Image: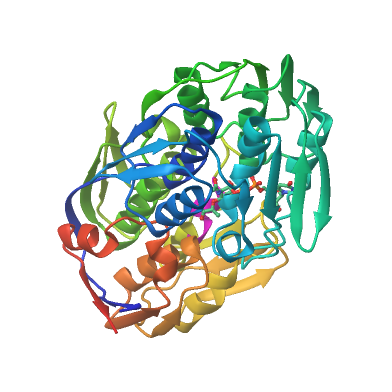
Amino acid sequence: MDKLKITGGRPLEGEVQVSGAKNAALPIMCAALLSAKPLALTNVPRLRDISTMARLLAQMGVAVERSEQGAVLHAKAITDPTATYELVKTMRASVLVLGPLLARCGEAKVSLPGGCAIGARPVDQHVKGLQAMGATISIEHGYMQASARRLRGARIVMDLVTVTGTENLMMAAALAEGETLLENAAREPEVLDLARCLGAMGAKIEGAGSDVIRIQGVRALGGAEHRVMPDRIETGTYLAAAAAAGGKIRLTGAAPKTLDATLDKLREAGSKITVTESSIEIETARRPAAVSVRTAPYPGFATDMQAQFMALACVADGTALITETIFENRFMHAIELQRLGADIRLEGNTAVVRGVERLQGAGVMATDLRASAGLVIAALVAEGDTVVDRIYHLDRGYEGLEKKLGLLGARVARIA
Ligand code: EPU
């Protein structure tokens, strides 16, 4: 069952609950490697990437117990500090084990991730930061072979803003000797959520959520309980879908404060947005106006929302410029959107999207997680049936997608 059949043309109406954030849960699961005591998590989404991370940690000797919306991870002893190519190639976030393993065990062997559908995605900043903390890292047979007696605190100025790079170094620094200063750090809310979890485990971290993070290393970390933050990209995806398809939906269990850039753009498109502390309602009465976006690190407009806004622009009134500045190859969905009748011209890292009155259903192919989300949104507004192939990409990051869309009145079915 690896295709999704969507019959478009209906406005969305109803209420759905947002899941825990994939990109917060993944680094937080890796934080369990830093302590011999159990880490109990709630609001853990049921996603393919989370199962992959659980499998990776289990291979290292971590006891992983999953419940409906939770997980208890217990790294009493790490038996094998290795992340094999087989798992790393299926999920790049596996590289997040590097910092914690090195800090806890003094050694790690982690496969180089290689390129992926959205760009080259090197890990040089992760490596450079760990080297500054005293690690020796060599590349052998496609693996990063890392060792260190005990990591030492250091002042690290990152060349560019990297989310998992910041997370990897923050975790390593939590157990290093002395103080680490991470400058030009990523300000993404997921970095802050990880810092909160590490803080509950006993780490001494200040400034997470800003671009300078100060970490005072401690000898050991303890156990903790932590609730994973709501998924802001899942939230934004349903909001963009509702703006494109029209109607009125409400999302509960959300964190509106993490979605400022997205909400601003949706208002600009003409939707009415009402927020409380943990819910967002969006009402769209007419065809959206064209809005241009330019991706940037947080608090700018998220690259993980770019494909969804391109889909919105396809049916908007006017011309929108969609500029991608984070990844060099994140426009694969443009070609597929054209198959649905979209008018898109690519000029370097900008897509010029001229809105059309209507799209038409067709067969399309998903290329990566967020590209697939863009295709689903386009399918919801297209006339007739769209079949999205290779939806395993969606299962990596959207919990119960067809169930949630069904709750909103969309006609969606998983087919073989
Ligand atoms: N980069 C380097 N060197 C490095 C690290 C990054 O050149 O050592 C470059 C990348 O190639 C890219 C830019 O820096 O051009 C930013 O990449 P970043 O490291 O921030 O991305 P990431 O940490 O690998 C996370 C999310 C992505 C999200 C990006 C950007 C997780 C697990 N993944 O990736 O999420 O797109 O940040 O916000 O947190 C997704 O969920 O679909 C997804 C791809």
Residue shown at the point (25%, 65%) measured from the top left: 402
Residue span colored magenta: 302-307
Residue 203 location (% of width, % of height)? 55, 18
Image spot of residue 341 (x, y percent): 45, 81
Residue 259, position in %: x, y?
Answer: 43, 37
Left or right: residue 96 versus residue 32 is right
In the rendered view, does 362 fall on the left or right side of 189? left
Q: Is residue 340 magenta?
A: no
The structure's colour scheme is: rainbow
Look at the picture and state if 174 lies above or below 67: above
Residue 275 in which image quadrant = top left
Residue at 29% x, 26% y is 277
Could you tell me what secondary structure mostly forms the magenta stretch? helix
Q: Is residue 29 above or below residue 396?
A: above
Q: How many marks?
A: 0
Residue 42 percent location from the top left of the image: 31, 35
Is residue 367 depicted above or below 236 in this figure? below
- Tell me which corner region of the image, top left, top right, bottom left or bottom right, holds residue 250: top left
Which is more toward the observer, 209 or 385?
209
